[in-house]
Image (spheres, grey):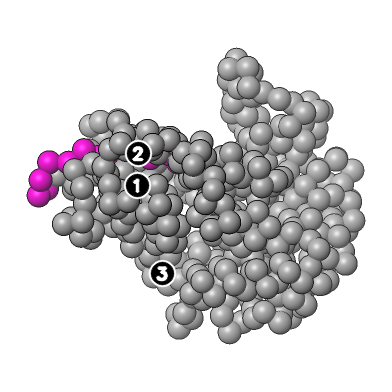
Amino acid sequence: MDIMAMVGGTPGKDCGGFCKFCYYKTIDFKKLDTISLGCKYCPPDQIGCDNCHKFKDELNNGFKPASQVLYTLMNILSWHKFLDNLDYNNLRIITASCADIIFYPELYKLVSELKDQGLKVHLGYTSGKGINDMKIVKKLISLGVDEINFSVFSTDPEMRRTWMKDKSPEQSLKALKIFCENMEVNATSVVIPGVINEEEIIRTCSILEDWGVKSFILSRFVNYKDQGLILNYGPVIDGIEPQPYQQFEEMVKRVAREFSIRVIGSPMYDPENNIPYMLSKRENWKYLKRLKTINGEATIITSKLSLKHLKKIFDIIAGDRVNVIAADKDIGDLITQEDLMELDFDEVKEKVIIPGGALVHDQVANKIFNHDKKRTMLRGPFCLFLNDFEVSNKEDVLLYELRSFNALIDKINK
């Protein structure tokens, strides 16, 4: 079980400055409060709640005192203990920041407190730009940090200097190598067309493999609202066209075949475990027999990246009783009311199911779907596939998907 310990931090300020490709770069932080987002947890008469404002609040309010972070974390642990679902042997605390965890002024204090309680500590995102002295690395190692996420971008110092605005890239890369030798490291790189090509990725991956990195996550560069920039006032980098997802997926697959370390794509693509949507792959169609029988009719609203997978599955198990429609978003949890308003309502049945995490108030969604005729709107499960970089085996993936799709079928049959 992973539990997040959010320490706050403001992007661009508490991270050594914006990288050229940072998607926070084109957010107007002063106008965040004017952006209206709703979610599943909003009260019936109010658009906006603690849950859907949490992200905006984290961006705006700077770093939190360690005492506040620990107090919140202890309450979460106490609640899980009360529910009797706290397994300390498999518990990991992820110290997360909207900026860079290395810049957190009370990092040593926070890590020390967590380790004193016998907890595994995973440091969230760092770019390495805050490490200009190896004493920082040695201190974190001595405190017993178990794992860290490191944005390497490239192992070429000049690439880091230019694109990450890293003032001491040689030191950052030296720190990464030492981390790899002493703890588990998940390295990441943003794949920018015309900047980070497959040859550069393979070169970087080869070096990381020699250093002993645990995994290498390749993140697809996004530049437009439909790809996920819902809080941004414009593209991150003018003139750069993001790589089509299918090409990105194929590239991740080719790189993964070249190396023994785990290579994963983001948005979630794990070639080793057939994620996402293991059930949509032809060799796994036999497992569809384990799903419940569909007795009802419904339209399922999904994302552009999930459309082909869900259509394959429901064409087999439901025929014309269920149709799947994609909103104009790559990620289902980033679907907003504007995306729903642009759907072709002639294709929407009397029962419609939206993603569980869609950023729209239930009453707003109901109003949109009932503007032309009476419909029933429901929310599906939060995730239909195992969105977990740490997944251990294909059986876990399969069982998760079977449970999730059966929960969705329950909604269809309701």
The residue wearing badge 1 is 318
Q: Which residues are magenta?
A: 371-382
- For image coordinates 65% across by 54% down, the residue present is 273
Badge 3: how crowded within 10 Å, few (<14), some, or many (20+)? Answer: some
Q: Mark 2–mark 1 contact, CB under 8 Å?
A: yes
**x and y percent of residue 169 in the render?**
77, 71
Magenta-drawn stretch contains 370? no
As rendered, which of 324 and 259 lies closer to the eye?
324
Figure check: 142 above or below 213:
above
In 3D space, how far apart are the residues under numbered discs 2 and 1 (Cα atoms)? 6 Å
The residue wearing badge 3 is 224
Q: Quadrant of the C terminus?
A: top left
In 3D space, how far apart are the residues under numbered discs 3 and 2 (Cα atoms)? 37 Å
Label 3 residue SS: loop
Type of amino acid at the residue the image marks with label 1: Ala
Tag in front: 1 or 3:
1
The residue wearing badge 2 is 294
As rendered, which of 308 and 173 lies closer to the eye?
308
Q: In the current view of this chain or complex, which residue is farthest to the top?
A: 82
Q: So how many labels did they put on this image?
A: 3
Q: In the current view of this chain or complex, which residue is farthest to the left?
A: 372
Type of amino acid at the residue the image marks with label 2: Ile
Label 1 residue SS: loop
Figure check: 252 above or below 84:
below
